[in-house]
Image: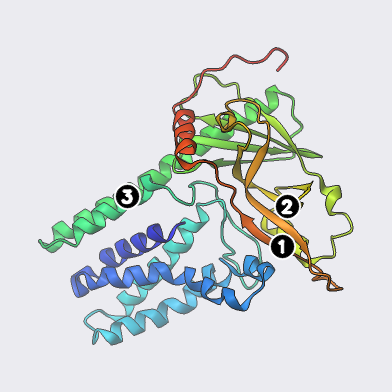
Amino acid sequence: MDFVTQVTLGGAVGQATMHRELGNKAVLWGLLAGALPDLDVVAYPLMDAVTQLTWHRSISHSILLVVVLSPLLGWLIARLHHYEVTVEKATLFSFLALGSHILIDLFTTYGTQIFAPFADTQVAWNLLFIIDPLFTLPLLLFLLLSMLPGEVRARQFRNAAGLILALAYVITALLFKFSADTAFERAFARQKIPVQRMMTTPTPLNTILWRGVAETADGYYIGYHSMLDGSEYIPLWFVPRNEKLLEGFQDQRAIQVLQWFSDGWYSAEQTPEGLFFRDLRYGEFDAVEPANSYGVAPPLDLEFMFTFTILDTGVEGHDRLTFEGPNFPMPDIEQAFDLLWKRIKGVSRVPVAGK
């Protein structure tokens, strides 16, 4: 998830585990531990675009890192504070802080390579959008309140309240996801779509409005469903995969990495600007008529939020192709939030004849 969420959660873990011994210094250690895995981006200048995509959230977000780094960080904390906190407790803090960072990244669509370096499998549970203020702000508020002067027990209670609210929000998101899965399964079955696999993801900044994608033999059907919709009917539109555009490039490392990164949820498109590889997991908007976005009406010209431009370096071999991006084509932000809010509140629909 975003940096603010990661350091806030780390700070809350520090406050919960080491506050009695270190006071608010425990929060500072939590902020550091919460940020630590995302420092993998420091190595970006040494890498090309293809390697960057495979490197981010790999070994730095793995179970191995947590197991190896926790006792080292725990010993360092205890040593620097002259053993006011025991090595065992500082190690427990390190394990929980680093582990919670990886855990909430698993809640997102991007996911992490938790089994690196032994496997490059990306694990993503699609529960939370990468930025969700309803998860972060209560956690941050109660963490700040816990840092104010007062009795230790009262301060710990405030911090615990924030952690409990965060956990409750995740559980609510899980229940909403189950509901969205059921709604989309019914919609795909009702419209007789031969689904090979299905994915549901939350839309930006909330867990009320969900996006569903069904893969078929030659492409994908996409739709939106709000927990507040007044009808079970979900309009769907088709996006072709166009994998033929990538024929002849399957030996290219760049194409292999993009297909791996997208987990196969992609669409290729040849345009006057070049060959685009669109990762379909992260949403889209209508570039011609933004009001049609979020499934309100059939889109006229889709722009996907994660789009890579394929480039030819002219160098022979498996690295002849590279890519630029991901590019994030953004609509008018104020209008986008207004459309999102309206769609979250739900719509009432009548099924089209024959659907």
Q: Decide if residue 70 is on the left or right side of residue 19.
A: right
Q: Amino acid at mark 2?
A: Phe
Return the x and y of residue 216 as percentages of the image width and height.
Answer: 77, 38
Give yes or no for contact between labels 2 and 1 (Cβ–Cβ under 8 Å): yes
Can residue 164 be seen here? The reply is: no
Between 56 and 304, the residue placed more toward the observer is 304
Q: Which residue is mark 2?
A: 277
Tell which tag, 3 or 2, sits nearer the viewer. 2
Q: Amino acid at mark 3?
A: Leu
Which of the 4 image quarters holds residue 319? bottom right
The residue drawn where x is 44% and y is 27% is 345
Q: Decide if residue 295 is on the left or right side of residue 152.
A: right
Which of the 4 image quarters holds residue 7? bottom left
Q: Quadrant of the C terminus?
A: top right
Return the x and y of residue 24 as percentages of the image width and height.
Answer: 21, 69
Q: Residue furthest left?
A: 150
Q: Residue furthest front?
A: 272
Depicted 111 relative to depicted 32: above or below: above
- Whichever of labels 3 and 2 marks the residue nearer the N terminus, that label is 3
